[in-house]
Amino acid sequence: MKIFINIIIFLAFFYESHCALPNCANGVACPPGGIWSEWVTTDRCSTDCGSCSTMYYTRTCMTSPTCSCTGNNTHYLPCNTQTCVYPAQRACCVPYVPMVIDGKQQCGPFPKDTGAAACCPTAGVWSEWGPAVRNSDNTAFEQSRTCLSAAAGCTCTGNRINPWSSDKCPCPDFQTDLNDKLLEPTESFSIRPSGVVYDRIACTYTTPLNSTEWNCSSSRGYQSTTLLRYIRADNGEREDYRVGDCKDTSDEKHNVTFYCDFSTLQWRLTNNNVAVLTFNQVSKKR
């Protein structure tokens, strides 16, 4: 109990309390230096008095990654800082000296936090929106976020939940206005596959590619191949993907599936995990 009380005394007097932070100036979205948690430790002090020992403390940047913190997240701090009494050989261990702090004999001076003073932004500090998930009623998708500054006494304004108004996959529709970009001058046409199977619960989009001789292309040394072309979301470039041999009647080789990435809200081709904006089957001229 003695050790515990002295730790509390030390932290209470020499580290700022996050219970009543002042408000930041208008327009400040991130407090200078971020908002740190209190210093905490799991160590036990090896001496009873005199600031003769130290304990290892850690703290967490509560507003990361939205608002980064400046300063160290680890620190060695003196423990059991009350002065030693007779018959101890000395009242305090070097470099500390006896002094009265808040009416009590302590071995100080104590280290001070020289970082920027924390403050509460007007709207608080929110985390980024999390991945999309089905709501508790399984009727639609929603995203949630966390008020990072709440633990410091800084409330957030705004909605914690971002619901979709309808039971629709959160990934946007494929950008069919980009389809003209899929064709090269030497190619005849692109084919929008039919028979699409859309799973609103799993958020997948499965489409069969045409495998008749007319719709197949020569590509990469193949005389007759089912060729998928898409626009990459990361760089806007076209890219071809050979799905299967048109002369092979195995259906699974001519189906492609896209899934909604709930973290990035992009459609990805399951075959190679590439995020795409739009796609088509391309038939090249012979």
Image (spheres, rainbow, N blue to C red):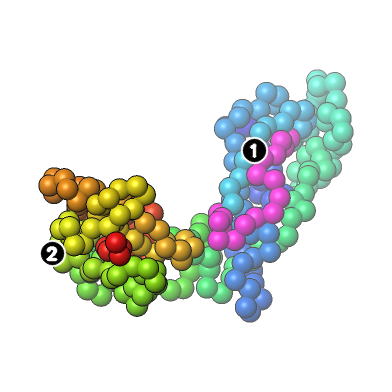
- Position of 119 with respect to 139 (left or right) is right
Magenta region, main secondary structure: loop
- Position of 285 with respect to 37 (left or right) is left
- Position of 147 with respect to 252 (left or right) is right
Q: Secondary structure at mark 2?
A: loop
Task: Residue 75: say if magenta.
Answer: yes
Of residues 24 and 240, the one nearer the viewer is 240
Q: Which residue is mark 2?
A: 195
Q: Residue furthest front?
A: 286
Whole-number angstrom distance, CA of label 2 to CA of label 1: 61 Å
Residue 158 to residue 98: above or below:
below
Count residues near mark 2 (Cα–Cα under 10 Å), then give few for <14, some for 14-19, many for 20+. Answer: few
**Magenta residue span:** 62-78
Q: Marks 2 and 1: which is nearer the front?
A: 2
Q: Quadrant of the N terminus?
A: top right
Q: Amino acid at mark 2?
A: Gly
Q: Which residue is mark 1?
A: 57
Task: Residue 95: say if magenta.
Answer: no
Q: Quadrant of the C terminus?
A: bottom left
Count residues near mark 1 (Cα–Cα under 10 Å), then give few for <14, some for 14-19, many for 20+. Answer: some
Residue 208 visible in image: no
**Could you tell me residue 115's position as x and y percent?**
74, 55
Return the disc, 2 or 1, that comes first in the chain's sequence. 1
Residue 251 to residue 216: above or below:
above
Please report contact status of discs 2 and 1: CB closer than 8 Å, yes or no. Answer: no
Q: Amino acid at mark 1?
A: Tyr
**Residue under the image location 77 percent in, 28 percent down:** 52
**Could you tell me residue 85's position as x and y percent?**
79, 27
Q: Secondary structure at mark 1?
A: strand
